[in-house]
Amino acid sequence: MGKGVTKKRLGKKSRIIALVGVVGLVLGGWCASRWDVWFDNPDEAAYTPSNVPTRVLLTFGNENGLTRNVSWTAGKTVQKAFVELFDRDDSLMSRVDAVGEVFESRSGQAAYYVARLRDMKAGHAYRYRVCTGNQYSAWYAFHLPTEEEGHTSFLYMGDIQDSIGGMANQLLRKALHHHPDAEFLVCGGDLTERPTDAYWGETFESLDSVGQAMPVLTVTGNHDYLKGVICQLERRFSLIHSYFLDSMIGENQVFTVCYQDVQMFCLDGNREFFYLATQRKWLREQMSKSQAKWKIVVIHHPLYSIRGSMNNIIQRWMFDGLIREQGVDLVLQGHEHAYARMTAHDDDGKAATPIYTISHCSPKNYRIEFDERFDKFGSGSRYYQTVRTHADTLFLAAYDAFTHSLYDSLLIVKREDMARVIDLGQDIPERIHFTPNLNNRKDVAFAQRIEAYKKKSKSKKFQ
């Protein structure tokens, strides 16, 4: 009797050990397959920065929409540097001293400079150039809005990162050609493929002639970080996108700016839980004192994912309730390399704010899920959005970045603190193009998912 019990126990123990071994092997194999995704950072080739000022970038300066920062890089050591600012209306020239700092990356070092332009006049046009030592950049120009305009217009692009051959710059210039009233550019993170000097060079090729003439506002994305158990953002990022230097809370890259009747709130969704909690406190404080008619949040990771219901759940849990509570109108997001738009609904089921959009302008397209909560999807192309406000109306439109044809559109009309959403994009055909690799199980499943979605969506039109 005793021997039988002992054998049973030994048999059970052996099965448990075997099961643990199998689970360990499966987990080990899965971790091995994901190791590069989680922890591998590309090597950075050695580089030597030019002594002539390069990579000039115009950004917002602080919460006041009439301030500007100019950042650039030149040489390896800090020298006397400044911006020459010319007011074309008053024919006055002023010099604004810059602050320099040497940043050493994994494979080189360069001196970065930031000049903070303040006390400028609304409605005026300016020319400027930067100087380091005795080396000058070319002249650039920008203008400030008048205080009486009462409207805003800007361009939004999600992930740009891997432009490959300058395609992003071509798309950006053409987008601005089609929408010449855009006053600044907003990017939803992953503007740079990876934090190396070569990729930063590609980023500035993408922004060439644009990033020097209008403010560029971006948030951090996962590609901006060095991978690791605890991800790290190089200080180089903040030295380039210099508004973060004065606005970050601890290591949180947060920023807000009031531009005419709009207030933008920029979050860093790539951080760990305790950082997100700090950002939530900051966001509540900023929104509670906001007097802006329109509130727009920009975050890289979508609060409602189209790649899986559990994706970004911590970001959603941390921010979504507050965003709805504080009356945010629009949430601009990236990361998932497709287009999608979701509208909130009130207790009576009527369309309401906030509006959540996902967009990208990268050559990479991801397989997505067709969550019924979303109003519209787009896959197989690149997209950008325009946001315009005037009086009591916000106009949101999405465009195909290749054809610049209208892909989605809606209005938010706000009167007496009541917002009404008017969907103008429901009759525009959806474009969901995908050519599967028949030897790839996930590709085949996605193709089947697309066909099922099209069959189910009988009221929709498809290109």
Image (cartoon, grey):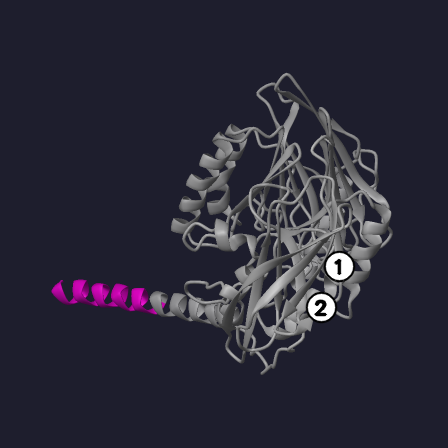
Would residue 74 appear left or right of 395 to someone viewing this image? Answer: left
User: What residue appears at the point 48 percent right and 39 percent down from the top-left corner?
Assistant: 283
Residue located at (43% from left, 54% from top): 272
450 w.r.t. 165: above or below: above
Q: Badges 2 and 1: C-beta atoms under 8 Å apart? A: yes
Quadrant where the N terminus sits is bottom left
- Mark 2 surroundings: few (<14), some (14-19) or many (≥20) residues within 10 A: some
Kindly give the residue lying farthest to the top in the view shown: 416
Residue 141 x %, y %? 76, 55
**Which of 139/3 is in front?**
139
The answer to whether residue 162 is visible is no
Q: Which of 172/303 is in front?
A: 172
Q: Is residue 7 magenta?
A: yes
Q: What amino acid is at disc 2?
A: Ser
Q: Is residue 53 magenta?
A: no
Q: Quick one: which residue is furthest to the left in this view?
A: 2
**Residue 332, located in which quarter of the rendered image?**
top right
Task: Say which amino acid is labelled 1.
Answer: Tyr
Residue at (46, 54) in percent of width and height: 271
Q: Residue tagged by mark 2?
A: 137
Disc marking residue 140: 1
Q: In the rendered view, does 147 fall on the left or right side of 98?
A: right
Q: Position of residue 170 (x, y in %)?
A: 82, 61
- Judge the density around disc 1: few (<14), some (14-19), many (≥20) Cα neighbours within 10 Å: some
Residue 397: x and y, percent? 77, 39
User: Which residue is nearer to you in this view: 123 or 49?
Assistant: 123
* Label 2: element kind: loop
Quarter-of-image position of residue 398: top right
Start and end of the magenta stretch? 1-18
